[in-house]
Amino acid sequence: MTQTLDLHFAGRRALVLHPAATVRAQLAARLSALGVETDESWPADEPDLARADILFADVDTGHDEQFPWRRGQAPIPTVGLIQSEAPGRLAWALQQGFDAFQPLAALGKVYSTLVIATARAAERQQRMMRDAEVARRTGLRHVLVQATLKMMRREGLDEMAALKRLRALAMAERVALEDAAAIYLAEAEPRAAGGRE
Amino acid sequence: MKDFKVGLLFSTSGPYAALGQSALDGALMALDEVNAAGGIRLSPVMADPRGIPMEYERLTGEMVQGGGLRHIVGGITSWSRKDIIPVLERQGGMLWYPCPYEGFEISDHVVYLGACPNQHLVPLIDHVAEAAPRRAFLVGSNYVWGWETLRVARERLSARQVALAGERYVPLGDTDTAHLVAEIAESRPDVIVNSLIGPSNHAFMRELARLKEDGLDCLVVSANQTEADLEALGPAADGMLAIGAWFETVEGQATADFRARIAARYGAGYRASCNFATAHTAVHLLARGLERAGHDDTRAVFDAVAGEAQDSVLGPLAIDPVTRHASLVPRLARARAGAFEIISDPGQAVAPDPYLTRLAAVAPATGPRPAARPQLRIVS
């Protein structure tokens, strides 16, 4: 179980976006005990995120324009720092899609926040990659249709037999069915250009 | 002279009474030393939670109610500490915790004087791994101390290519360990990591001693053995390798003087332990903080002693201001004829690393070793 969790954070950099210097200092001290170096930034309208491996951002003053990514698509683990519990602020924080939350009253528990944020961010990245792959393959549907039709015509197969052969090609090439269809079309095209059809 | 009340919250009855009594004895001796020195006056407020978790919560509440008392020296198990902390967070107060524990905690209401894994289990396992054992068997009490210490042992050993012959947990207080010993007889490990505490530890070690008489050649190592366990175990402890921040046999004049004072107070036959010495240190450190701060505000008292090298009966000691844990000297000792023979004393304190963030990677093993199938199962 623990093998799959990221438990060691030494050598990483955190960026803390919070208006209160004492909060930034306290969090930096706690993080330093875990081997994490901290950059602080305020005001935080255009934070320098290039060096950050993990982001801590104040929920009370936060807004979407602070971050150069769409909601829920941060490339690094993100943590919302909670002070007030104003419902509107919590609603924004949830929409922003923070990976974990850290109440300022419990900075002593920042290790568990790091573990949770890192694990949740990894899940999120995997989901994003899966979603992107599904979208890509959906975009190739017409290629699959074209390849199936071409194979039916050229090989004299019915649609089920043509699809079955494309699946076999996909397995042999270890690619998605839509990619196998593209491969088939690419190989078929030059011959088609030769006017043999 | 300023007078401060100090809570002493140790279980002197119940399943781990021997450990609690030892710590309480150390704390009371230090209290008298502080009062004799004359800077401030400490008055003890004592309570016995009898090893019952809920009693720690109730008695802590009674002690700190109304702000009459803000500092408690106490707690043995992690379970007890975790029951004390929420009360101190709500009502204000600070716990001076004198026992080795499994790490992964920093509370602003605790000063951690016992060792954490980079000061006990990690150096112990690294020492054992140098002899290149092939198979290890892990056994512990079924609560957070057993789980976390054995997790560290398992990961550290497997990084060194030591195969796991088994990992078993025994309910707290359970003395039926025959099935464990039978399994050990079967799997023939070279090393056993023992994180059993109290009566389970004693039952297991006695059964294992019989197995050793029948020819089992196996090193037992542990990070939670004290002189109190040696008394209970007798010859069954012989050969066991222990690590601790203090043993009675630590060399040097400071230990000799300390032991003379212990003998004068409790008798020549009294056996002190790491818990005794650490609780003693806790009271002296608290007294220094109170004296310097001039009042018992928890933050002021902590700030008055944190980050500064202190002399203590444990050796050189400092409390890290951020992690609130003590730097300690990890000593390795082998049990023989009722005493711990020190086999390695680095003389220098090791800084605390409660989250194991500075843990150096293990060097890869030089050659392939025959791998045994790990058999993982939780017995509860």
Image (tube, rainbow, N blue to C red):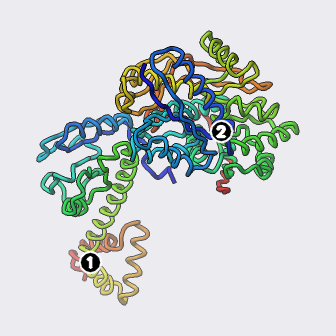
Frontmost residue, B300 versus B196 = B300
Distance from Cα at disc 1 to Cα at disc 2: 75 Å
Frontmost residue, A156 versus A140 = A140
Q: Where is residue B38 in the image (x, y as percent from the top left)?
A: 48, 15
Q: How crowded is mark 2: few (under 14 residues within 10 Å), some or many (20 or more)?
A: many
Residue denoted by label 1: A141
Q: Position of residue B221 (x, y in %)?
A: 68, 34
**Three-letter code for the amino acid on which mark 1 is drawn:** Arg
Q: Position of residue B271 (x, y in %)?
A: 71, 25
**Chain ID, mark 1:** A
In contact (CB < 8 Å): disc 1 and disc 2 = no
Q: Is B378 on the left-hand or right-hand side of A189?
A: right
**Chain ID, mark 2:** B
Frontmost residue, A30 versus B153 = A30
Q: How many numbered badges does the structure rendering display?
A: 2
Q: Is B208 on the left-hand or right-hand side of A167?
A: right
- Above-or-below relation of B160 to B249: below
Q: What residue sits 50% from the left and 22% below the top?
A: B284
Q: Is A21 on the left-hand or right-hand side of A158?
A: left
Q: Seen from this angle, which residue lies furthest right?
A: B214
**Three-letter code for the amino acid on which mark 2 is drawn:** Thr
Same chain? Circles 1 and 2? no
Residue denoted by label 2: B12
Q: How crowded is mark 1: few (under 14 residues within 10 Å), some or many (20 or more)?
A: some
